Amino acid sequence: MKQFLLSGSLLILALTGISTNMNAQTKKYPSLNHMALYVVNLERSTAFYRDIIGLETLDEPFKDGRHSWFKVGEHSQVHVISGADKATTHDKNTHLCFSVPSMKEFLEVLQQHHIAWEDWPGKAGSVTHRVDGVQQIYLRDPDGYWLEINDDKY
């Protein structure tokens, strides 16, 4: 009878969606909310991220002419903020990475706009082919920030 009651209780828990494994509780981890890039020319950077990278623009709440916001995930954004005195040099190891559905189509956009790219070692116009099958390139935005673009394999 005890075995029947235990089995019945477990069945009811399973049917109602209540976990019988106390270790399987949902954990809440920090998530990326936004990245902010400080730029010299807001219009030029906005056009780059919108028209070249293909990011969706969002309404930004400040309405002060100094910000552009872009959607980069379900709950993540890139904020471009004007006011930098000059573009600065950045190391390629520090970069933002965006995945695109088609590397071929993305490279065509870069070619149409005469934007240079390189592979990881720095060979101009080349694509890195990683061991996991992902293709990737690197380019700089108008303020010298490095971007990795890879094809969407995940």
Image (cartoon, rainbow, N blue to C red):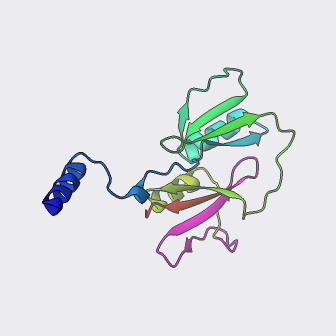
**How far across and how far down the image is residue 135, in percent?**
51, 69
Residue at the image position 62 percent from the left and 38 percent from the top? 47
Residue in front for this viewpoint, 10 or 60: 10
Residue at x 64% of width, y 32% of height: 68
Q: Position of residue 143 (x, y in %)?
A: 76, 47
Q: Is residue 111 above or below residue 39?
A: below
> In what quadrant of the picture does the N terminus appear?
bottom left
Which residue is found at the position 60% from the left and 71% from the top? 126
Q: Is residue 39 above or below residue 154?
A: above
Dividing the picture into quarters, in which one does residue 122 lie?
A: bottom right
Q: Position of residue 25 (x, y in %)?
A: 43, 52
Indicate whether residue 131 is drawn in magenta.
yes
Q: Which residues are magenta?
A: 120-146
35 relative position to 133: left or right:
right
Residue 22 found in image quarter: bottom left
Residue 23 position, x and y percent, is: 43, 59
